[in-house]
Image (cartoon, rainbow, N blue to C red):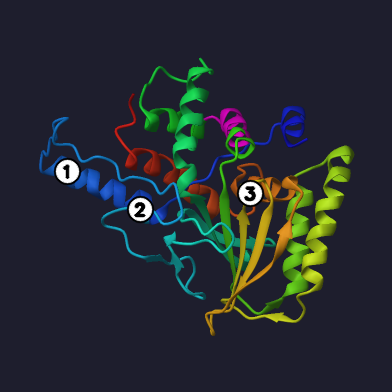
Amino acid sequence: MFKSFLKTKPVRYVPALAVSAYAINYQLNQLHNQQHNIIHSDTQQQQPASIAHDVGDPIRKPFRTFTDEIDVDNSISSFPTVIPHAEYSQEPFELVGHGVRSVTFIGFKVYGIGIYIAQHDIPQTIKILKEFSINNPALPDDDSLVGVAKAIIDNPSESDQVAYDLLDNGVRFLARLSPVRNTDFNHMKDGLIKSILSGHKDVDTKQSLNQGLDELRAIFQGWRGSVPKNDVLVLEMLQNGELGLSYENQKSGEVKKMGVVGNPLIGKTLMWKYLSSTKPLSESLRESCTAGFSAILDHYGSGKN
């Protein structure tokens, strides 16, 4: 259903991955190397860090020059650049983009958001991008992953399709939402549902979402009351397409599992909306993910076969 919807009405979607600090650090390092005329031979070139594939593997830090946290908005706590053990999968997730969700014409801030990708799924992401470039002759003749990434990002119709490919082939993302002002669980639930429904306009697709939306509502029925500014709602895509929700109390440090939505359309649609370039929920998030997409691909190797 998710695939058929995208085929029916393409949504200008830019796949996720990271930014500000990622891209800035990457560009600064590149400039530093150019200024000092540093040339690495194939035998001297540093090998890309290995990616954790099993629980218990070493957790890879995104960049040597990277900090452990990154500022998303000055009204909330910094976000971690790596989540060593996600609440449901216990796998590491790496920050790929961040921003602030604002509403109304005056830019009323609602929450800070970070999008993470499962480190285990980054090789699959690179594989999908390579296959996509081979099967799409409209892309420039460039055998570097970074070149392909830039071409995809610059072409909205291409980015729509590759985003679907990532989600449909099990690449898992995690969203971390932190309200910038006091709110409550009911408002957070309504915001999620509104975002999900805004991603699907046709009646048939909306009907197929009803079961998943009922599951989401049932989860929030067990959570009443206020959500203080700076606390965190975490949405984690799971291996089987389900969406796990958890809540972090920033003052106590306590993390509680809220429940799991079994309908895979819910998780896919939410991540799709967070990363979409068509009326994005957060323009700053979209720009962050766009810049980081190229940076992460380049970070994992030379970009050539």
**Nearest to N terminus: mark 3 or mark 2:** 2
Disc 1 and disc 2 in contact, CB within 8 angstroms: no
Look at mark 2 in the image and give the residue it sits on.
62
**For the residue marked with disc 3, what is the amino acid?**
Met
Left or right of 235: which side holds 120? left
| Residue 119, image x, y percentages | 45, 48
Residue 273 badge: none
Look at mark 3 in the image and give the residue it sits on.
271
Residue 298 vertical position relative to residue 210 in the rendered view, above or below: above
| Residue 228, image x, y percentages | 63, 81
Secondary element type, mark 2: loop
Left or right of 159: which side holds 304? left
Secondary element type, mark 3: helix
Of tags 1 and 2, the one toward the viewer is 2
Other-residue count near label 1 (Cα within 10 Å), few / some / many at <14 / 14–19 / ≥20: few
Look at mark 1 in the image and give the residue it sits on.
33
Residue at 75% from the left image edge and 52% from the top image edge: 262
Magenta segment main secondary structure: helix
Residue at 43% from the left image edge and 46% from the top image edge: 292
Quarter of the picture containing the C terminus is top left
Q: Nearer the viewer, residue 216 or 177?
A: 216
Of tags 3 and 1, the one toward the viewer is 3
Which quadrant of the structure image shows residue 177?
Answer: bottom right
**For the residue marked with disc 2, what is the amino acid?**
Pro
Q: CA distance from mark 3 to mark 1?
A: 36 Å
